Image: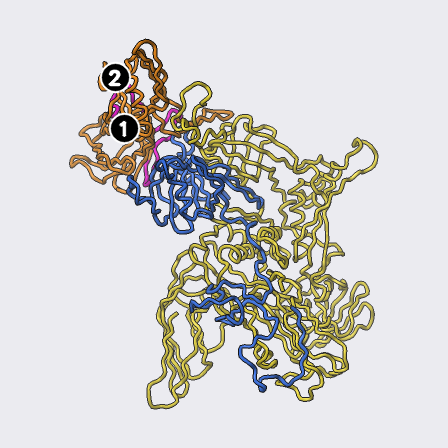
Amino acid sequence: MPYTDILNPTPTHPLNPDYGFQKKRPVTHLVSKANQGPPYFRDIMDVGHQFSLNWADKLASDARKLKWYYESYRGGLFTLVDYEGGGRMYTGRFSSPVEPVPTSNNHWTVQGVLFDEIPLSPMITYPSDWADDAVWMLTLNDFGDRMVAAVSGTWTLATIAGALSAQCFVNGGTVTTDAAGYVYQGYGFQLWAPTGPAYGQATVLLDTVAVGTVDFFSSSAQPSSSLLTVQNVPLGLHTLTLQPLHAKDSASTGYSVVFDALQVMR
Amino acid sequence: MGTPVPLSYGFFRATGMQINSFEVLPTIAVPLGTFPAGMQIGMWDLGEGELDGCDALWIDSALQFALDSSGALMGTSLVGVTPSNLATTPTLNYFTFSTGCDGGNAAGISSLWTYFSNLVTPLTFSRRCYYAIGWTPPTSGGGSLTPLVDWRGMRCRIFDQYGNQTAYRFTTNPIWHFVDLWLRRAIKPDYAIDSLLGPTPLTAAEAGCFNWASIYAAAQFCDHILPNGSPRFSGSYVFTSGSTLAAMIEQVLLCCRGYWYEYAGQIFVFVDQPRASTFTVAGKMLVPGSIEADQTEVNQAPNRFIATYLELGLPAVAQIATAVRTATNVKLVTVQPNPCAPADIISVGGVADPTLDACYDVTTTPTTTEVDCTISGGVASSSTGGWLGYIQSRFSQRTPEISHVQHQMAEGQVLPPNTTGTRLKRIKVSYDFANMTYDQAMRLLQYEVYRSLGLDFLNPNLLQQVDGNLSRLGNPYQPPFGLTLSLWSESVDVNGNALKAQFVGDIITLDPTVFFEFAGDWEIIDRYTNPIQQEIEDSTSGNFVSPVSRSGALTSGTDQNSGILQLVLRTFNRSVGIFTDASVAPNASFQTVPGQLPYAGAGISGLTVQPGATLTATTYYGGSWSVSWTSFSVQLGSGVIVSYPGGGASGSSGSPVGVLYVDDPTFGGGGGVTFVGGGMPAPGLGIFLVCLFTLPTPPSSSVGPPNTITVSF
Amino acid sequence: MPLPGFTSELIQIMSARSGPAPICLLDVLCLDGTSYHWGNTPITATPVKTGTHPAWLAGQAFQPANYDTHYYPWLLSGTEFHHTRSQQSYQANIVVQDVSGNTLQRDTAGMIVGTAFEGAWFAFREWNPLAQQTEFEQHGRLTIISVSEIEINFGANGLFNSNDYDGNPYEVSETCQWLYASLACGDTTNNPCQNTYATCRIPNHFFGYLNNVVFTSAPSVASVSTNQMVRNRLV
């Protein structure tokens, strides 16, 4: 049973859930508060979105179809479209039974059916509303802690004009085995960084697979912008790695590479 | 049959288990072989080998031979000596022992076995240390073959801080005993012991079971020589009954303030000693409401500590007033009457002139306080002081004790403190330190007392040792506290130290923001690690729940300790009163003769070679020979390869056994390779055997080629 | 002495107020050499040890690029890792899912039955995915506590439990105490003995005592000693 099966392919489709369904994002992290100071926060799980759906006064055939979706995809997944949320798609399944209740002749109501998004599932269309659905992840968090790891090689914090982060993670770019890593919970990402005349090129890997090459060169210093977008990534815990290529634009005067910020789709 | 085979380390005195007994009846007129009629033969087993050797032998309470602390013979040996009066004096015809290597190595043992004809099956008692005695009683009757021997126990592998085996020898270092126990029982229980090359070397995986940095540091700490001339700690023990490895390790580590743990597949061992704090706990790490202090370990704890041990030194039987030496005589005058008698062998030590510290045969005792000993070639000297004793009184049982009076008073307070009279509640506990010196036992006992109960401010001797004065005499009793607390496991302190790196035995500091009254240094006794586990929402609250929980059980559930490190701490007191190196001066009841500890043997090093090289030996008509070898390598325990060059040697005569060995104390390679035609090199650090072989028989005719062999090693 | 392996980079990452939680990883090496790599989230990481791939893998639709570095998300929890300065032994607890498979046969239970898990060597780690380094590591041996339709409960015993070993395992006996063909035995002829002297292949390595005379052949009159001898049996 493929994920390409869409429960509600159009906004007027009879299986489209009633307007105003409850949307939830279960807790996926641990928060621990010591006697003093800010709490500690750790991402643990990659649980997806949850919706509580209702269908009121549907035909028996529609109620049966809903029941069929529950039965068919108990161990599988299908796609639900959230038209209220701008048409964003979610891949998952009904995790609670579909129990139609008759309300009048040939009219049935189904209430409180939970739809759970399944992590690491393929999607027909991956979320792309970077303005509303993505969050920023900078080199330093709000407490000044560095969130990027020097997996290998020498990386230093540096203040760069026009960067989004108060300090960026910079590498000389000449050792191709150097690597910086960032771990996030979410879908796809956009890699943001300032560019300039002394920068080089790097390869970006997601979960050890190369997903693109980034050129940090520009003829004049430019503020941070999106240099690479990788959208089609299923929900999960992902490791992004930046590795210098020891390569540069012919006009560049250096090989340095920069980690500034990520915009992560949530 | 059915008794456990003993395991012995360090110095001990034992007869062993008799395994053979034969006697030739005195009706035989003609002696058989080289042994007289009436000779009794006995063999005794001492357990697992290899043991290093013996320092002294008595038979029927008569000393047959003994070595002094330098290894020199005390008096003369009676082995093979025919007494002047066979009617009244027994004869020690024969003595040999096998260290307990594969196949045994008792010198000349085959002649004893062949004495019994081919109906008796000779055994090598492989891997058992045993000794054999041929002894003839006085012809007029009486006497019995009842031996008692002072032994140097197990040979152990010695390592450096990288896990390279640097020696294989007798040792009293408890840390090397600890390593040997783990190898022998768990990590490498199956190995061979070659009589010359020693035990099978460790593989890299076996060596990888130990954290050598901690082991080496602990061993060096134990071996450190204190101002009194003895190592800081030594261990000598015999395990005879069926006990667990845990009980043996506990005994070994008791003798050196040791503790151990395993982490990430490695064994670490440490000696408790003053050490710095390696982490500072602040309030921003503490789980709210998780800290609690108590003194339950002190309440009802023992407070009368008794050390039980066998003294390795010689108990002093008399104090020397004067000692005078001429060319032919040493005269000792004791302070009090002494028990010496003519023909005694005495040990003298602690004289102001140390050249007078020696062993002597007593010739005459003119008065109850005078002892004359005949010598030869003596240099005139007149001195004072010192003690004398007897070798047979070594291993005397001793039971000194320390009482913690303040704790006894605290526990015994059944009436208000201002009531007249002292009420002490004494609860005793005994510590078995096996065999060691008084000083070592008392320093260990002092550690046990004051680490458990805190300092005793009613003990003036202790305060003099700790403070150099008595200003704190009578101060209130301050017992140690226990503390339990939970911390965020990924905490990092202000100095950049990680909490997760702190392990049992480490010292951490609680700063005042944690618990103001208990700020200070604490030792980690227990650590509970709780990984950050999956967490779900409460399914009973009416909220949505995670899909993984909807199946009913496919979830680890919420672990309320998720991400928390729970520590059990104990007050850490660095006082020199606890970790003292100062020799405890024995009172008269425990005085020993200074400098008369048992002989510790010559030390034999063995290190095997990585195979791959060859040696070619050629003998010529007439017996001359030449030998050449290719370059070869030794792989050390850490994986480091040390290389040595090829070379050659030649000679015209000598033993048919050839020995190729290396003398390289630093294991740096590149040189020190020597070949000798026969004869073993003197043992020493860095000397290890490479190849042992037999030269080919020389050709019997000058016509034809010489005989050549090629040996791979 | 603080534990080794904590680099300044790892400590820097651990000190952050936010970030990903360390991932629990479990490597198992069974007595038959089969290896398993489980985590509480699917992740690629360097294993502590590798072994033979299980036969189960061949029948799976999902084939990881490298089985040795792919951690299946089957690990549910690891708890009660207790270390002490005394010689107390302890047993931690590891729970692994037993749901995956098909309606008839579960993956993990099938592995339990088909492979030597009892006594299997394991390495449990808390692995920091950002620094890609280990924060905590424990090795040991597994014992199966319970197998249900949903999860499997392993007891995780320490690797070096001194209470488990006999301190004096050898006895004075007429039976040789060595395992045949061990290094101490020394025989390489692949002709097992019965641990008796009469069947011993390397008699000079025999690790026992004889209580009576062993006749290797019928003695002739000439072999019998004419000396009077008293022999005492003492063992």
Where residue B319 appears, as percent x and y from the top left, is 76, 62
In this orientation, which residue lies closer to the viewer: C97 or A173?
C97
Q: Residue furthest top?
A: A104
Q: Quadrant of residue A96?
A: top left
Whether callout 2 and callout 1 share a subunit is answered yes
| Residue neighbourhood size for the residue with mark 1, other residues' Cα within 10 Å, grouped as few (<14), some (14–19), many (≥20) | many
Residue type (three-letter) at the residue carrying disc 1: Gly
Chain identifier for the blue-coloured part of the image:
C
SS for tag 1? loop
In this orientation, which residue lies closer to the viewer: B465 or B114?
B114
> What is the drawing colour of chain A?
orange
Residue A188: numbered disc: 1
Magenta residues span A126-155
Residue type (three-letter) at the residue carrying disc 2: Gly
Q: Quadrant of residue B222?
A: bottom right
The answer to whether mark 2 and mark 1 are in CB contact below 8 A is no
Tell me: residue C119, above or below residue B589. above
Q: Is residue B623 left or right of residue B262?
A: left
Where residue B384 appears, as percent x and y from the top left, is 74, 64
Tell me the quarter of the image containing the N terminus of chain A.
top left
Residue A192 seen in the figure: no
Tell me: residue B480, above or below residue C204. above
> What is the drawing colour of chain B?
yellow
In this orientation, which residue lies closer to the viewer: B210 or A217?
B210
Q: Is residue B116 left or right of residue B331?
A: left
Residue A86: numbered disc: 2
Pinpoint the chain carrying mark 1: A
Q: CA distance from mark 2 to mark 1?
A: 18 Å
